[in-house]
Image (spheres, rainbow, N blue to C red):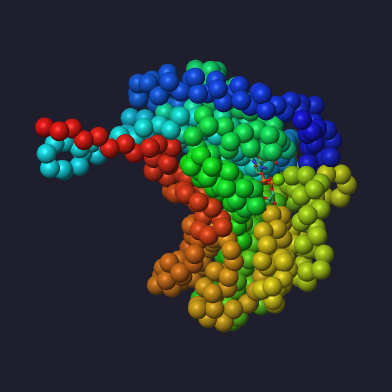
Amino acid sequence: MSTLINPATGVEIDASPASATLEEADAAIERAADAFAAWRDVAPGERARLLRTFAAVVDEHLEELARLEVLNAGHTIGNARWEAGNVRDCLNYYSAAPERLFGRQIPVPGGTDITFHEPLGVVGVIVPWNFPMPIAAWGFAPALAAGNTVVLKPAELTPLTAMRIGELALEAGLPEGVLTVVPGKGSVVGERFVTHPLVRKVCFTGSTAVGKQIMAGCADQVKRVTLELGGKSANIVFADADVAAAAASAPYAVFDNAGQDCCARSRILVQRAAYDEFVGRLETAVKALRVLDPADEQSEMGPLVSAGQRDAVRSYVEGASVAFTGTAPDGPGWWLPPTVVESRDTGEAVWREEVFGPVVAVMAFDDEEEAVALANDTEYGLSGSIFTSDVGRALRVARAVEAGNLSVNSHSSVRYWTPFGGYKQSGLGRELGPDAPDAFTEEKNVFIAH
Ligand code: NAP
Ligand code: MG
């Protein structure tokens, strides 16, 4: 495994797990397939109890997991605690599923017809570096609840919390092979999840480019696949909105996690009559953002995950018309200040491409129709926000924007109670919400002749 580096300091981390080889990946998949036979037959109430115990053990180690994520990924301690808590919450939420995995009885002539939700077998979860804990749990919690076993590949840059969660699963009493964390390269371990016939579904979160390869690879075995990919989401602010509230919240909607968020509202559309007021208030809010050592309790934004990511983001800023920036620490580590660009041309890279860093582009619009057209002028469609005091407009625009997760007068995207996923090239399928376990099952129909 490449050496891990603390993104806030540039200092090497004294804990780098070895990358699994192809043979080791195969062995992990085979063990998961062996464990499936027993796991699917664990009584529903017992599987529920094990998942609740797993949640409790994660909760007992919440601070340890959070500190590990600060060290490995540079997440602010406040965010990292939320992320570890989200793993616990997903496990608790989906612990209700084994006892509620209902089929149907369908009226038919000549007999009785019933349906079952059968588990798939081994599910491969491939996780990116931006939210190592939550994205892992959105895959494994509902998959395990539905009776599947899981092999999980964390991103090479950020394996540490996933490895620890794998240990905690065993501590909680999950049988060996039910949840196996396999650290390693995407091109080795991730690729093997796609090609190994015993892996029956791949649940991938990451870049659109790799997602397309995964989808193509899965086609070979007609393997089930869920994709959560990139985004270029719009935050639409109408002049009738509470402009002060919209401007105060906008930085958090894009600079949270240093902008390394597929739901980042990285395009802000502001109705012309409110444009100057909004941008003025935005400047005040961005300058006040506390970009500090992520271990500092006051920190609201930390560093980028890697030198490579920092450089990629910086290349978008060079050549763009920067209106203003916030602050960032000097010295070592992969820091960039939150940066606001005023865009006048929708062809600019910073307006079109997913920057995946602390950069936001602002543009003015004249009317509702133009706002919707601009918001939809992208290959992506993951999330977005609408600020207005007109409830009719809020609903019209929410229905018209081609994205999976919209919020009105707020920036909420991902809540474990509600479905999450993208339109267009932002993804395929949905995660989370009450129906997530169904996505890890086959619906089987059985007809019994009378
Ligand atoms: P990525 O390359 O798509 O990586 C995501 C995961 O897929 C990692 O675990 C990666 O392994 C694995 N992977 C890579 N190539 C694979 C392959 N051929 N087969 C199977 N698995 C493979 O994303 P990234 O490089 O981390 O980030 C690049 C860009 O993707 C970002 O700048 C951003 O635009 C986007 N992104 C989006 C999200 C999101 O939540 N939608 C999350 C992260 C990144 P390795 O550890 O070896 O890379
Ligand atoms: Mg990559």
Q: Which of 238 and 354 is in front in this view?
A: 354
Q: In this view, does 404 lie to the left or right of 342?
A: left
- In the rendered image, which quarter contains the N terminus? top right
Residue situated furthest right in the rendering: 331
Q: In which quarter of the image is residue 62?
A: top right
Residue 307: horizontal and vertical position, in percent? 81, 46
Q: In which quarter of the image is ligand 1?
A: top right
Q: Is residue 60 visible?
A: no
Report the residue at 52% width, 29% height from top.
198
Picture residue at 80% right of the left edge, 32% below the top? 3
Q: Which residue is drawn at 11% across and 32% down?
A: 450
Q: Where is residue 321 in the image (x, y as percent from the top left)?
A: 78, 71
- Residue at image point 63% right, 77% down: 364
In the picture provided, is 42 more to the left or to the right than 187? Answer: left
Residue 295's spot in the image, x, y percent? Answer: 73, 39
Quick check: 275 above or below 53?
A: below
Quadrant in the picture for residue 426? bottom right
Picture mark count: 0
